[in-house]
Amino acid sequence: MKILAVGMNYAEHNKELDGTLYIPEEPVIFTKPDSALLKDSKPFFIPDFTKQCDYETELVVRICRLGKNISERFAHRYYDAYTVGIDFTARDLQRKLRAEGKPWELSKAFDNSAVIGDFVSKEELPDVQQLHFHLDIDGKTVQQGFTGDMIYSVDRLVAFVSQYFTLKIGDLIFTGTPVGVGPVAIDQHLDGYLEGRKVLSFNVK
């Protein structure tokens, strides 16, 4: 399986990072290796190479069919479930890499940087562009998102990435984070919710 992730897919988040409501001309895509995956409520250990490790709460879509060059109008047939995930980012390292014009991977694709929760079937939540999700840290809500605010819809993302990558069963797409990202600290507890249902729960070490 592979992890495909989307950057800058919520305008307000783009403003919080760069000071402008930037709208990319096409989806911004990066990848994470399978070693980035963290699941089953296992703890997340902050890497030694960063002094600012930020959470980015996202809707994660699970691919259920083999597909290449998928038409946007048929894209909904290629995913079957959603969950809440955290795209952990070594923000200080990312700033350095961006300033040097280098790729983001070291700050985004490190081990255990892609946390996922329990999946909810599409049958239970049929409209992927009408989903609310949020993250609590130690019982306090720190980030909230609504998929209707995405710059590029889930179906558009599936169609776009399938031009470049053959999608396979079990692949994951992290669809971008809304405004409200921030750093985590040792001994914090994170809970992620999708339409009011807790699907994600883990500790930071």
Image: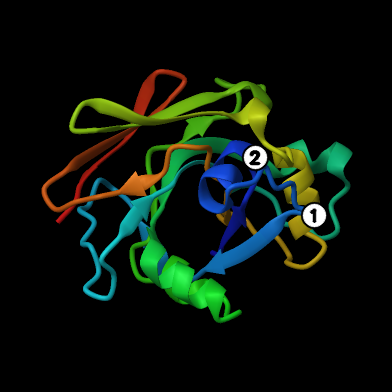
Q: Is residue 10 above or below residue 98?
A: above
Q: Secondary structure at mark 2?
A: helix
Residue at which label 2 appears: 11
Nearest the eye: 92 or 123: 92
- Identify the disc placed on residue 198: none
Specify whether residue 195 is in view.
yes
Residue at image coords 37%, 67%: 92
Mark 2 or 1, closer to the camera:
2
Q: Secondary structure at mark 1?
A: loop
Image marks 2 and 1: residues in contact by CB distance under 8 Å: no
- Give the mark nearer the N terminus: 2 vs 1: 2
Q: In the rendered image, which quarter is residue 36 located in?
A: bottom left
Instruction: Tell me: 173 left or right of 160.
Output: left
Q: Amino acid at mark 2?
A: Ala
Instruction: Tell me: 47 left or right of 96.
Output: left
Q: CA distance from mark 2 to mark 1?
A: 13 Å
Residue at which label 1 appears: 26
Question: Could you tell me residue 110's position as x and y percent?
Answer: 39, 71
Residue at image coords 55%, 72%: 98
